Amino acid sequence: MAKFRYSRWDGTQVGFDYDADSLLGEMTDDLLYHGDLNAAMRRLMQQGMQDREGRDMQGLREMLDELRQRRREIQERYDLGGVYDDINQQLDDVIDQERAGQQRRVDEAQAQGDERRQEMLQQMAAERRMELDNLPPDLAGRVQELQNYDWMDDAARERFEQLMDDLRKQLLDNMFNQLSQGLSQQSPEQLQRTKDMMAELNEMLRQREAGEEPDFQGFMDRYGDMFPGNPQSLDELLEQMAQSMAAMQRLLNSMSPEQRQQLQQLAESLLDDMDLRWQVDELARNLQNAFPQMGWGQSMPFRGDEPLPLNSMTGMLEQIGDIDTLENMLRNATDPSKLAEVDPDQIADLLGDDAADSLRELQKLAKTLEDAGLIEQREGRYELTPKGIRRIGQRALGDLFRKLVQDRAGKHEIERSGAGHERSNDHKPYEFGDPFHLDVGETIRNAIWRTGGGVPVRLSPEDFEIEVTEQISRSATVLMLDVSLSMEMRGRFLSAKKVAMALHSLISSQFPRDYLGMVSFGRVAREVKPEKLPEATWDFEWGTNMQHAMMLARKMLARQTGQKQIIMITDGEPTAHILPGGGTFFDYPPDPRTIEATLREVMRCTKDGIRINTFMLEESHYLRDFVERMMNMNRGRAFFTTPENLGDYVLVDFLEHKRKHRRAS
């Protein structure tokens, strides 16, 4: 069942202030750089974020660090030797009580004047004192000897038996803290029921190992009250018990050999029922075989000086178990759906309310983006929707336009009006030669003003008002994006990809009649569909095949009308081309054959009326020579720029090109 925690509002309980756009914005650079939405979401979950008010939302990495710190605090606080110090102190108190009881009985006989009884008690007390003086120094030996000791003081005997019952229960609870409710009573009937339960559990483990289907429901009908965790399956039950036993085993592994031997001997002394001891050992072996990944051979380096009593061991082991479980769940949470399995209340208990609030927000990450229509799940993976792709492009466009002067960016305007079919919502008096797109309302209004009203309304040529229409221009652009390995190694890929997203957003929103195609090129070139642009990434091989990219761009533009251009963003000269047989040739420094093949493709583009504008991110000798030759053939333009101002040049040039084209129309 879901759990909720409420408190009185005091003005400080303010939730995180963010929306789907800000979440997508946090992931944009990561998404564009790596091209993987799921990986970008995973990294956002790992690193966290800040909301619009500057409040930190913890990521999983920070939570994991805090969980590990909590484990270190526990280990640096306790001394495992305290287990024996506490029990030894209680045994010393019982022995002192027994000695005092011996002397009291002797004194009582002396006070009664019964010399024979006094002499017998003195001799008995001397023998018992000798037994107590000769007790073994180790804890397990003392317990075993005292279990066979003939007590003279009834109160001391009862106290010792109660101590043994408490230790027996604590020891079993430490091994199986899931059974704490069932072992709360140590009556013979309850003990036999516990042994029967363990025997059936061992049998179910053997059945499962043999490929049979154990009767888990029948087992829970008989023994379900002994498991307060209310497991819903055999696997869940076994995992709970394995976690408890594995934690106890790790604690034993953390002790010195002498400490471990003492505790094991103490367990043998306390669990004097041979059948119970056999069932416990058998269950431990079966669980270790069934869950080898539980870290049975690991240890916990305790370095503190605070004694750890046996009755506190269960709580400490349970806390470390919770830390281990949460750490494992957070480490394996690769997407928000798996993170939903983590209980925020457990995080609150261990790390505080701020961490729990951060976890709740991370659990809603995917749903927030889905509800906003920015992502959707397809075949178990999250993918951007068309709306999400547009939103990323708009963000990239906004980032770049913030660097530009407002009036330089301009709009899709034209200096004169004329023939066309795009209405501008303006009107003017008719002049000879104008297209007769009559504005009826304005024409009648002019006639009424001229005649002063009345019917019928008689029109004259000077009343005619026509609608103003814009001339229509259309551009077809192919963006050629260099995705060779050097673009990533020199830190230029992200800036270039942002420009591609910004151009896509600009053209699709402001110039919907225009065409924008995209080609990525490394050792070979590929057409990139706009919906797949966020996933585009660099090639893991050397080679800059401009020839193949221009060939694809030319074929794409051949199907379009209007002014045609190629915008090429690259950081290197051509080093690869397509061979006549279809293979790829690569060499560096550039081979003359590669240069000639690329220039032949430039000539074909020029003949088809395609202008090539190049944005160079590297001012090398080879690249400059090649671009100059290309400009002489194509009459395009070249810009030497940097990743920081690449977007300024590309967008301003695109808009300037549009304005010139419209004026030329």
Image (cartoon, rainbow, N blue to C red):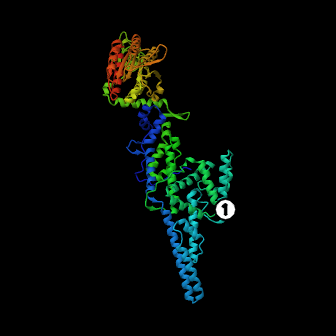
- Considering only vertical position in the picture, is 210 above or below 578? below
* Between 164 and 530, the one nearer to me in the picture: 164
* Between 182 and 364, the one nearer to me in the picture: 182
> What's the residue type where badge 1 is placed?
Gln
- Considering only vertical position in the picture, is 60 above or below 607? below
Q: Residue furthest bottom?
A: 113
**Numbered-mark total:** 1
Place residue 268 in its image quadrant.
bottom right
Q: Position of residue 24 (x, y in %)?
A: 44, 36
- Considering only vertical position in the picture, is 143 above or below 508? below
Q: Position of residue 102 (x, y in %)?
A: 55, 79
Give neighbour class at mark 1: few <14, some 14-19, many 20+ (Cα, 10 Å): some
Q: Is residue 222 left or right of residue 417?
A: right
Q: Position of residue 233 (x, y in %)?
A: 63, 49
Residue 548 showing in the rendered view: yes
Looking at the rendered image, the quarter that the C terminus falls into is top left
Residue 416 showing in the rendered view: no
Element carrying mark 1:
helix
* Between 91 and 628, the one nearer to me in the picture: 91
Q: Position of residue 220 (x, y in %)?
A: 66, 53
Place residue 467 in its image quadrant.
top left
Q: Is residue 544 left or right of residue 264?
A: left
User: Pointer 1: what residue?
Assistant: 192
